[in-house]
Image: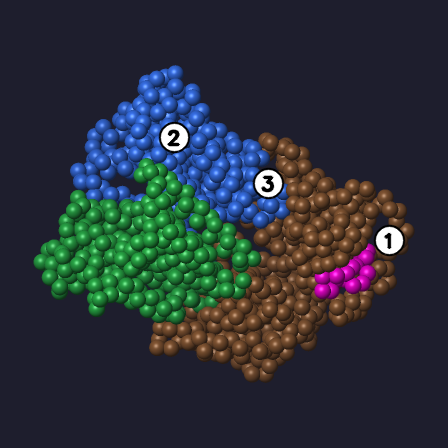
Chain colours: A green, B blue, C brown
Amino acid sequence: MTAMKRYPFLPALVILVVLLVLNGAFQPRSVSVAGMTGLAKTYLALMLLAIGQTYVVYAGDIDLSAGAIVSLVNVSVVLLMEHWGGDGLSVLAAIAIGLATGLACGLINGVVVAALRLQAIVATFATSIFFMGLALHLMPVAGTPAPAAFWRTYGGRVLEVPFVFWAIIALAALLTILARTRLALQLLAVGDDAQGAYQSGLPATAIRIKGYALCGAFAALAALCVTGDTASGDPLVGGKMTLFSIAAVVLGGSALSGGHGTVVGSLIGALIIGLIGSLVYFVGTPSEWQNLVQGVAILLALMAGILVGRKARA
Amino acid sequence: MTTLAALATRPLVIALALIVLLLALGQALSPGFASAQQILRLLIVAALLGIVAAGQNLVILGGREGIDLSVGGVVSLSAIIAGNLMNGADAGIPLAVLACVLIGALFGLLNGLGVTLLRIPPLVMTLGMLGVLQGLLVVVRQGIPSGRAAPGLSSFVSQPFLLGLPGILWLWIAVGIVLALLLSRTVFGHRIYAIGANEHAATMAGVPVKAVRIALFTLSGIFAAIAGICLLGYSGSSFANVGEQYMLPSIIAVVFGGTPLSGGKGGYTGTMAGAVLLVILQSILTTLNIDESGRQMVFGATLLVLMLFYGRGRAMRA
Amino acid sequence: MAKLKLSGISKTYGATVALHDGALAVDAGDVHVLMGANGSGKSTLCKVIAGSVRPDAGAVLIDDTPVTISGPRVARALGIGVFYQELSLAARRTVAENICLPDLPMTAGVLVDRKALAARAARTIALFDGVAGDGFTADATVDSLRADQRQLVEIMKALASEAPILIFDEPTSALDRAQVERFFAIIRDLKAQGRAMIFISHRMDEITAIGDRVTVIRDGRTVGTWRLDETDTATIIAHMVGERSEPPGARASRPPQDETMSGPEARAPRDIALSVRGLGGSGFTDVTFDLHRGEILGFGGLHGQGQSAVLRTLFGALPRSAGDVTRGDTALPLRTPREAIRRGIAYVSGDRRRDGVIQGRPILENLTPIHYLRQRLMLARPSVLQQKAQAAVDALNTKFAGFAHAIDSLSGGNQQKVVIARWLMDRPDVLLLDDPTKGIDLAAKADLFALIRTLARDGMAIVLYSSEDAELLGNADRILVFNGGRIRRELAGADRTRYNLYHAAYEAA
């Protein structure tokens, strides 16, 4: 009971293990190192986006522009790398500017929602239209390739270990530190009772803006992974990711109403979405039925997670 | 003076003022923008959005973070099924309408049951349902050539029917009147507001909270299905995911109409104005000589600016 | 020299004047009591000092230096700690985190120093050692605590600020006596340390026990300040209510006329409106009593001993785990409020914001929901409904401008009257009152009890739970004293004394 309170992602973890076992049963190769690397390579972006979304959800907000930020950073980074010649230094410079872009988008969201006090759902939808338009403006049609130095690193190995695993280790360290910061606790307190937090002397508006900024930064990281995975720029690439990131947060046991949740859960949630997709494929579902089966499975997982989580907490 | 100031902060008044302003702006930018012909065309497009927004409006009014993200999926599914069932023949219209309304009601009912009996947050439930609907779209489309709208349906949407207005506008007006009466003069309407404003107090006052909320989601499914049929009539034939464009705009129309997402206050008259406002805004942008990406940026920025006129959240410091 | 001095404080919300020319001077080492009816402006004045309300005009001086309190953060920096009446807690965070949230101890500037946090929380929690109740630990999340324990956390949060100026806005409303006594001991300590404190309470006995000075606020104006040892209760109440010659509190506490009531033993069984046998539910067991028509049955005892839960269970708002409720030969299942309402049972909660008021909606819509249900109406015709509602609101002296106005435009007391009036459009047989006067002003209380007595005289069966002993002693024909979720004693006739009530309430369970 208390374990459930402290680790609200436990139901998600169970679902994840079941999915891994099922995946292994239907396609033994999927649980090999190569299979895992492939899964991580494809879904690291969604994991990062879901993590970013979690910080916003902590404070009781929501970011419907997260996917649009991914698109914008993806095209910006690819264009900059191409423009600067694609060698190592220009890749790093492009990455830095990409991260700054994500951060700036997050700040805009934060200011619009927290400082101007617009409703998060509609306001971030409006900013998503803006970001998407900007991405389209920068790169009207998909297809500009990313330089080889970039995607070879992402898909390659460092010291015999796939790069994505290093990335996951770095991510784990980053999340551990973030979980112990004042900001994490403050975001949760604001999400619990914004007025109460403000009256307690917390700078509630600044805290919510920081949450959005963090989400923007993680969206930029997600965009880098997307770029590494697809090796090209696509102004629409992030469009579908927003809703999946929210689903991942919910699957991970965080409350959309704020004040309660974990980033680890969201990470697991993103993996669940990925594994459902591959399982539907491995069991041999006819192609035109795959979307439906996947949709039903995600809906059931969302419902099951919420019901189990509630029962365990009660 | 104070009443004038109060009037100026009424969302409906803001929306109407903005509509007039935008029409004038449109006329200035491109003469003929505000012609009767053109306005009629805009209203038809607005009616499609407005009918989806009717259901969205009811769900939002019912509170507890009520929202229906699945309307887009229902619109698409309804458009496809209606097309397949009527396939260009007027004789197929009644069956198509009946089938679509039932399907819309079914998905709305499922949303409502999930939200009330299983207490899944509406955003999550309808988001998951959207995924299911999008999967179903792929299944329904397979192998069957996409059907065409019956001529009767097309003329209902675009040809003058009475007093120079096409049938769809009369339908929209009827929806507006029915909802206005429903919300102000029926026990059901008062109960919608009660559960939206204070669900706990409503329970203690004997309001059948779950039944009301299930009804709201079911109605949302039905309205989305009707909009899907009309959309088929508007475009002639359905294509993949036509309804997606209605998902978030239907919510914005409701907000621009003065119903905050927290529920419990507002109404449908404002939402109708909100739908018209959104459509005119989009239309003005298409008359401007800028490319699609620029239009999107201006649209997004304008939405943000317009939102500043509406129910901004309360300041922390009173 | 005054530690904190306010003058000319004004605040208006739209057309409502919340405060006009408010003045207050609090000395170091003093407990300064603020008194006034609800909506008189006490809380607004406190929130101006706390920085969460921006005054339209006025000056604030701390140690004779003018200060601008532009927000709660600034207030804290200026040495002001606040207990908020509506609490400012994060429900899903732990007790320790809540206590330290305003000023988190840090290592390396970005990470929370968990050790220091635990140590500071432990020091504060230790102040209430032994009275905080079961489950009150530093690691418990606030949502797992009872109402009185949450109030303790809010108190601890204010104390942990170690601020020289402390504001307590109704800090004791949910506390039991042992907790109040411990809290007062702490306050006396703080007095000795020279802290300046502002204290708001509706309980006269607490005010005289702890207060040094009292400032009375009426209709947003500070009427005056007196030393509590140089004045008496009647004078203060007279200042609070203004021109009224007879203090309404006195009327409410007049003992009932026993000779007009026959004792419960004398009643015939057909007079029983509700027969409760072995009722069990959340936090109470084996509750058995008969409720007669025309009687006011009091529920007494310390706060949170199951009284409220019994009433909510009878109304179908909480599940029943054991026992029967019957009327005559019919068993009443009472599984939902709807069922209870159809059986003629009414329930009025003291927590009107949560359980009663439908915020933002017209007064008429706040009056009609029960009528809709009992008459099975489909259509709502305003003119017809208004006619029927008029008598109900008149019975309570409800003051309002029009049925179409939003209920939020009324004062707290009038809002509660509307909530009660919704039950009077179609008379119920049984009226369950769950601390119905919590947080409403004295005049409204008087109107309410006058009505209750009339209703009882007309034959309605009424259960009254009140956290104020005077209300019980003054109005109930019989009092069932609860302790630990069971009825421990029944006080009737001459036994209904304050002494017996306290004695039964404190008896070891």
Q: Which residue is mark 3?
A: B208
Q: Position of residue C315 (x, y in %)?
A: 69, 48
Q: Secondary structure at mark 1?
A: helix
Residue C168 relative to residue B103: left or right: right
Residue A312 relative to residue B16: left or right: right
What residue is shown at x 38% (from left), y 77% (from top)?
A: C107
Q: Secondary structure at mark 3?
A: loop
- Main SS, magenta residues: strand
Residue C338 relative to residue C71: left or right: right
Q: Is residue A58 visible?
A: no
Depth order, front residue of C161/C504: C504
What residue is shown at x 42% (from left), y 28% (from top)?
A: B100
Tell me where residue C437 sits by quadrant: bottom right
Q: Which residue is mark 1?
A: C264
Q: Which residue is mark 2?
A: B78
Q: CA distance from mark 1 to mark 3?
A: 37 Å
Location of the N terminus of chain A by quadrant is bottom right
Cβ–Cβ below 8 Å for labels 2 and 1? Answer: no
What residue is shown at x 17% (from left), y 38% (from top)?
A: B289
Give the vertical position of B44 relative to C7 (above or below): above
Q: Chain of mark 3?
A: B
Q: Pointer 2: residues within 10 angstroms few (<14), some, or many (20+)? A: many
Q: Position of residue B232 (x, y in %)?
A: 33, 27
